[in-house]
Amino acid sequence: MIDIKLSIPAANWKANLTFEQAVNWINYMETNVSRIIIDYQEYIKLIAGVPYVYIKPLKDISKRVKIYAQNMSHVLKGAYTGEITIIMLKSIGCDGVILGHSERRNIFNETDELINKKVLLCQEHNMPFILCVGENLEQRRKGIAFEVIKNQIDLALKGFNKFELMVLAYEPVWAIGTGVPMEISDIKEAASFIIDYLRKNYKEVPVLYGGSVEENTAYFATFKTGLSGVLVGSKSLDPIEFERIVTLTFSGVNNLQFDKEHFET
Ligand code: PGA
């Protein structure tokens, strides 16, 4: 028996797609998928991080795709106009949530302490989550990338111990949205550092790479690196492109030699 590993291709739509496009995306992923996705579906955790207002209707039509929120409030309930809480997300069957994305940190000033509150809410309410960490360009140039990552992990995970809920996404800020992913050799180095750090100080959890992921990166970033998948922004918006990324991620994680056959539907 070969040992097949779980692969996690995750889409992060951010503030994109109309509702009609979102429905088409899910329908595409439910029907037009490669043989590999059908045959190994129990080993592929296909996630879509979608806008809040689409969560419930997309949940209603998707079987294969796990529907995640892209954020949630750090408070549980009360007089916080405009906030979306974990209770609300749970009550509509949301499958999980992305936390600490660099756009939340940088544009909306989310601090490590705030992210920690959200992590603890997920723990309390059994909500799966993807925790995003990653250094910016200045920190990388200064040679303190791994220090920054360690720090972000430690602060986010204070008081946390339900590791079965957690996936970690390493997303170097300087590679997000630029169209230029990190070099594969650098991804390998960062992956082995993070995987090792989590194993020694916390628990082994799936680790993803994110930052301008396209088809090649999905395959080579996961091929013999110990990474479990990818978090994909702009290249996740087109379902045809993302479906190929799903197949390639599975192939990479499972160290399969890639060939054309994997693209067959
Ligand atoms: P990108 O976004 O693939 O467009 O770089 C990734 C992310 O922000 O998760």
Image (cartoon, rainbow, N blue to C red):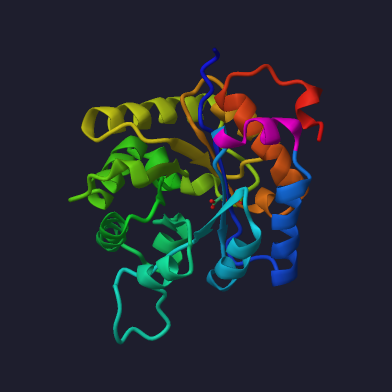
Q: Position of residue 128 (x, y in %)?
A: 40, 51
Q: Position of residue 143 (x, y in %)?
A: 35, 35
Where the N terminus falls, by quadrant? top right
Q: Residue at x 30, y 42 (%)?
A: 163
Choose between 181 and 132: the one closer to the eye. 132
Q: Is residue 226 magenta?
A: no
> Is residue 191 in view from this perspective?
yes
Magenta stretch: dominant secondary structure:
helix
Q: Nearer the viewer, residue 91 or 178?
A: 91
Taking the magenta stretch, the answer to whether it contains residue 41 is: yes
Quarter holding residue 150: top left
Q: Position of residue 48 (x, y in %)?
A: 58, 54
**Percent of width and height locating residue 19:** 69, 71
> Is residue 138 depicted above or below 88 in this figure?
above
Q: Nearer the viewer, residue 75 or 196?
A: 75
Left or right of residue 236, residue 206 in this image: left
> Is residue 216 in view from this perspective?
no
Q: Is residue 97 above or below residue 88?
A: above
Task: Kindly indicate the quadrant of the structure image that contains residue 219.
Answer: top right
Q: As drawn, which residue projects farthest toward the left?
A: 159
Residue segment shown in magenta = 34-42
Q: Is residue 168 left or right of residue 157?
A: right
In this rendering, position of residue 60 left or right of residue 238 = left
Q: How many marks?
A: 0
Compared with 49, 226 (above or below) is above
In the rendered image, the residue lying farthest to the top is 1
Q: Quadrant of residue 265?
A: top right
Q: Residue at x 39, y 56 (%)?
A: 100
Residue at x 60% of width, y 25% of height: 252
